[in-house]
Amino acid sequence: MRHFIRSAAVAIAMATASTFTLSAAMAADLSGAGSTFIYPVFAKWADTYKKDTGIGLNYQSIGSGGGIKQVIAKTVTFGATDKPMSDADLEKNGLVQFPMVMGGIVPIVNLTGVKPGELVLDGKTLAQIYLGAITTWDDAAIKALNPTLTLPSTAIAVVHRSDGSGTTFNFTDYLVKLSPDWKDKVGSDTAVEWPTGVGAKGSEGVANTVKQTDGGIGYVEYAYAKQNNLSYSKLVNAAGKVVEPSLESFGAAASNADFKTAKNFNVIITNEPGDTTWPIAASTWVLIHKAPDDAAATGEALKFFAWAYKDGKETAKALDYVSIPDSVVDLIKASWKADIQAGGKPVYAGE
Amino acid sequence: MSAVQEALPAVRGSRDATVRRFALTDSIFHATTRAAAILVLVLLGGVAISLFAGSWQALSTFGFSFLTSESWNPVTEKFGALAPIYGTIITSAIAILIAVPLGIGIAIFLTELCPRPLRRPIGMAVELLAGIPSIIYGIWGLFVLAPFLQTTVQPFIISVFHGIPGLNGLFAGPPYGIGLLTSAMILAIMILPFITSITKDVFDTVPSVLKESAYGIGCTTWEVTRRVVIPYTRIGIMGGVMLALGRALGETMAVTFVIGNAHRISTSLFAPATTISATIANEFTEAVGDLYTSSLVALGLILFVITFLILAIARYMLMRIDARTGA
């Protein structure tokens, strides 16, 4: 009996010790939450970064709204959102925001006899489809954009996201800019009151519903359309040119975005000018506290972001994201030095 | 002799101590179990209070119109719960319509007609349905059931009822494959084991004397089931149905996958709709703004009230049958 008690005590002591070492290791990990749009590239970056530095990243892709809530509640070191926070909200919660990565959103369609990239749409027509005003594929408005295609009389099955999403925010923002009707009746947000169609959960839900429904139309991040061989459509951009979704056309949208004069890097890159620009591009912003409680963790997070801007470019490209241009990265680092402080000194110690 | 007399008080003293110790352990035991029982009430009250507090902003802003308005617009912050309430009630009602006859049929077969060797496997299979996680039902519904309905069943039904007034509105296209009816079907499969196992248990409470007497005067199995077993267990079956209904009302993940998540009320069973729990699951993480979050919590409060009422009725019915059988 006595022997048993002694061995139990030893076991408990060992267990406690191992918990301590575990929590010490956990403390070194970065923690973040938010956007699902950025999750694939964060996961890949974190993988490489852990190999290089031994510091891991625990990122929960729970959606932009969730990320905002968590970072305000200080349960995570940083949040990530596809919809930038307003200046007032940033001020109120003592946060700074900066863009981390950009990408593109593409309309996907399911039409018998129409191959990927054959169909051309523009913002106005897209808005009419999503308003339920255009109900069949052989509508005059769609025919006018596609004089060479034979379009079926199939009913259009509109598919949208059912969960709140940054993708929806950017897509509806584009429709607002192109269609006064859409602006009046629906507006733009991470979730809106859709006039027609069916909601599917997550990008994978939208992709699947479109795949399964003859005459379906939806919208997803480009990487998603590409990896699943979904039939995407071309779009007419602000310059009136027909463009294909590609890293180049997203990059053109990013390079035309004016981050220099924008307060808090609040630039939405839909419907940007330029002949080669893809009209529905999107950024993901990182949110972090100005006066962090845990300066060390914030410093480590900023180090990781700096590394990602510099050494994560190839990874981002491989996953069809557009990296933030170097000129903008310099602006971002300057804002870190100026705004994120602990004890009167900037938290970020890099160059 | 004298030694015995001297020992007596000591014995009595140790006996008193033992009795006292017993009384003490009993009272501790009593207090612990009572505390556990009260904890449940406290938790339930806590949930109700926090739901009420969380939904206060929405309820005070929209008032009664929250229950009657169909608009759910995060952009203009106008919220009304009618569409999700409608979807919740309709999907659960159709699920009950499908699952009750099926479940009772299975229970009758298992208790009255099934050959012994088959009884266990079939019973186990039905119980296993309850063990499948709801996310699996959702994925199966989205990838297997919905496409099947979309390509075969729905176009056929739409063409059959086309032009028949009343019914053509009930089965109007386009066939998305997902919608009210698909969710109701998934729900029906999910609640089947509850109905079957409770019905089976109450069937077993029927005294064999009653059944044997009925068979003795020449009744068929159908007549015994119809005139003896079911009337005797009516309340118990109702209790089982109510429990299943409570489960159907609150089901979240499986429904979210296949209901189509559209905040609209339409007469067609093929149209996309939404339920209270699906709306909360879909929108809570992205709900930015106090009023939006509060409206979602208010939806939760409505569901809590509906489910609570249903389950209270179920418990009451099952209690009555217990009282009658003296169990």
Image (spheres, rainbow, N blue to C red):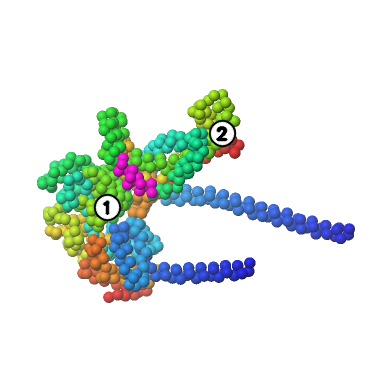
* Magenta stretch: dominant secondary structure: helix
Q: Label 2, secondary structure: give it.
A: loop
| Tags 2 and 1 both on a single chain | no
Seen at 57% across and 29% down, the residue is B212
In the image, residue A36 sits, relative to residue B310, either above or below, namely below
Q: How many marks?
A: 2
Seen at 59% across and 35% down, the residue is B325
Q: Position of residue A79 (x, y in %)?
A: 34, 62
* Span of residues in magenta: B136-149
Q: Position of residue B281 (x, y in %)?
A: 37, 50
Q: Say which of B6 and A171 sits in front.
A: B6
> Which mark, residue B206?
2
Q: Position of residue B5 (x, y in %)?
A: 86, 58
Residue on which disc 1 sits: A168
Q: Label 1, secondary structure: give it.
A: helix
Inter-mark Cα distance, 2 to 1: 58 Å
**Answer yes or no: do the residues labelled 2 and 1 have beta carbons within 8 Å?**
no
- Where's the N terminus of chain A, which quadrant? bottom right
- Where's the C terminus of chain A, which quadrant? bottom left
